[in-house]
Image (spheres, rainbow, N blue to C red):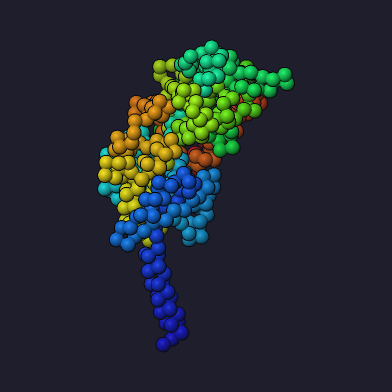
Amino acid sequence: MPHRTIIAATLVTAGTSLAAVAQDAPLTVAMHYTQEQAAPLLACLEEYDADGVTAQYQQISYRDYLQTVLTGRLGGQSPDIYNLYSIWAAQMVDNGVLDTPPDDLVSFVTDSYAEGTVDAATIDGTLWGVPTEVSAYLLVSNMALLREAGYDAPPATWDELREVAEAVTTRNAQGRIENAGFAIADSSSGAGFVHPFYALLYSEGGTPYSEDFAEANFESPEAVDALSLMAGLTQDDITDLSVDAYDFPAGGIGMMIMANWFKSEIAAGFGDAFAQDVVASAIPMGEEWRTLQYAFFMGVDSNSDRPEEAWALVRHLNEPRDGGPSCMGEMLAGLGALTANEADNAALPEPDAFTAPFVAALAEGRAISQPNVMQSAEIEGMMAQTIERVMAGEAEPEPALSGLDVEVEDILFEFY
């Protein structure tokens, strides 16, 4: 036998062996949740056995998730299933990372999930997976501080918010804030500045992009008004950026615009006083208020050796079980997070007083999906820097947003 024939035969044998090993290996589900947070889901994965197909969990850091996925894929290593933040989806689709769902799974999603949440998992008209965690932003108030300042209810308008925040804010002899009437979250992830800005922008009737994402709308009057409202709180010394809204559970912050996922940490901080003292209410922009919703969704890697089995596992994890919630629904409920799966919501207990307004915002169409635009993470980082500079008094809203608009459109031009 010629030498090259021996080599070829060896490679075929090795390839066959590797394929067999791959077929016997558990399907891998990659998420950003810790083992403790994902405990109900881990139990489902440990029990899963579909004709010999098993599953295992892989935790990837939220902050490094997208980069880890893209880098690992270049090295030929990728999980079978992802749980993805919706704004990463456009880049992953553009890089060919995601598999197209089968028709029966598309029908399952469109029949079972709220339309706005389906949009979060949709790129260019194609659905790429099953929506999982959903979050919306509302005003969250520490009523103990508001009552102490003479207010029995959260504000309903921005002028009222300014009044209440100013009344709640106290400073020490050095001028540093002790109790903050209002706080913005730490900007390290971008979301702390960007997501409240989206909520105000939508409430003003604006949109961040044109419908086809070819143009940015950050220099629009609505965007300037939204940022001016945020900046007015710091420019008028009602609050400052030294206070981090993520410290709300400690009890020294009166109000913040925050998502429902933070509930478990707030509840842990407030303890027995949580039900009485923490209230979620409408974005304080009058009757026409709107807000932002964002979502995660579960998709399958296009390089998976077993796409059919992977999609079957995705459905298994998200389909209600015998009158009870799905594996994902049970896990999310334990975290204080939301699912837009109607059957899950019917199987779960009625939401408590804190969670009910978030559920209503989604059900009433008040919550608008975060835009799935290319390079979203990069763009939102730029947005956060711009908003922070304006709130710090280093720039004025209109010229700062005009500059942002130009920078963002330079990015959009590459893709749209």
Task: Classify residue 391 as left or right of residue 158.
Answer: right
Q: Is residue 339 above or below residue 313?
A: above
Position in image of residue 176 (x %, y %): 68, 23
Q: In the rendered view, would you say 137 is above or below 164?
A: below
Q: Is residue 318 visible?
A: yes
Residue at 37% in and 30% down:
351
Residue 221 horizontal/vertical position (percent): 50, 21
Which residue is more in the foreground, 411 or 128? Answer: 128
Residue that protrudes farthest toward the right in the picture? 174
**Picture layout, residue 310 above or below residue 86:** below
* In the image, residue 273 above or below residue 80: above
| Image quadrant in which you'd find residue 360 | top left
Q: Residue furthest top?
A: 150
Locate residue 383: give its quadrant: top right
What quarter of the picture does the N terminus occupy? Answer: bottom left
Which residue is the extreme one toward the bottom?
A: 1
* 361 to the left or right of 246: left
Q: Is residue 266 visible?
A: no
Picture quadrant of residue 308: bottom left
Q: Residue at x 53, y 37 (%)?
A: 379
Quarter of the figure with the C terminus: top left
Label count reads 0
Q: Position of residue 320 (x, y in %)?
A: 30, 43
In the foreground, 114 or 260: 260
Residue sticking out furthest to the front: 272
- Percent of width and height locating residue 346: 29, 35
At x 56%, y 14%, the residue is: 149
